[in-house]
Amino acid sequence: AQSVAQPEDQVNVAEGNPLTVKCTYSVSGNPYLFWYVQYPNRGLQFLLKYITGDNLVKGSYGFEAEFNKSQTSFHLKKPSALVSDSALYFCAVRDVTGGYNKLIFGAGTRLAVHP
Amino acid sequence: DTGVSQNPRHKITKRGQNVTFRCDPISEHNRLYWYRQTLGQGPEFLTYFQNEAQLEKSRLLSDRFSAERPKGSFSTLEIQRTEQGDSAMYLCASSLGDMGPYEQYFGPGTRLTVT
């Protein structure tokens, strides 16, 4: 079965420092991977995706993610964190079991950026 | 605003009552999904529509839950005889068809509280 793990419940980082939010996956076949961000009382906003091609993908708001097939990881990164980046981040993998395109989400990682 | 919209944003109901939520997807998207998110967890897939056809249902979707997308546009999710365990955020998402770009766009969600 497809699955996603986010090993950290919370990540704390100082404003201006680089941040990394970790994600590992388990899929059969080629993985389609996504990152979403959720602000309080809001839906999920799409940040970026890996489908194929370059292992480093760039997305919205200065975020990027590195796909590593050998380590089955898809870590989210940003060179310089902002206080406004504080939110809940979800990694997801596309599950085509049964032939259809649903997303399997990790439990989420809360990012806290301190001034 | 051309994003996914959901109504109502909040619903408080007493145990045993029926509730209905509405989702309006992005207009050109033919795929529509319902997810449920409980506190501290990532969204979990409930059901999927392609146009008006309901093509997949999760085992999480008990007989008390029913979803429709009558004209391939908006969708409704009804919960009959609500239970306290139904309290959650119900998220709707939409996406384009088989050839990508695969990411799903989420609405703001409907938060259900069953008392």
Image (spheres, rainbow, N blue to C red):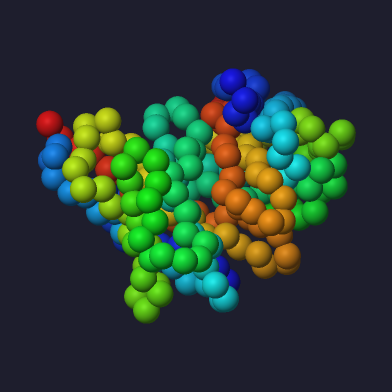
Of all residues, the one furthest to the front in this rendering is A53
Residue at 49% across / 38% down in the picture? A44
Residue at 85% across / 42% down in the picture? B52
Residue at 41% across / 65% down in the picture? A54
Is any atom of residue B76 visible in this view?
no
| Residue B46 in the figure: left or right of residue B69 | left
Residue A15 coordinates in the image, percent (x, y):
15, 37
Quadrant in the picture for residue B33: top right
Of all residues, the one furthest to the bottom in this rendering is A70
Quadrant in the picture for residue A17: top left
Q: Nearer the viewer, residue A49 or A96?
A: A49
Residue at 54% across / 57% down in the picture? A104
Residue A26 coordinates in the image, percent (x, y):
48, 71
| Residue A9 in the figure: left or right of residue B112 | left
Residue B24 coordinates in the image, percent (x, y):
70, 28
Q: Is residue A34 above or below residue A97?
A: above
Residue B110 coordinates in the image, percent (x, y):
59, 28
Quarter containing the C terminus of chain A: top left
How many labels sit on residues? 0
| Residue A48 in the figure: left or right of residue B90 | left
Q: Nearer the viewer, residue B98 or B78?
A: B98
Is any atom of residue A53 visible in this view?
yes
Q: Nearer the viewer, residue A27 or B112?
A: A27
Quadrant in the picture for residue A60: top left
Quarter containing the N terminus of chain A: bottom right
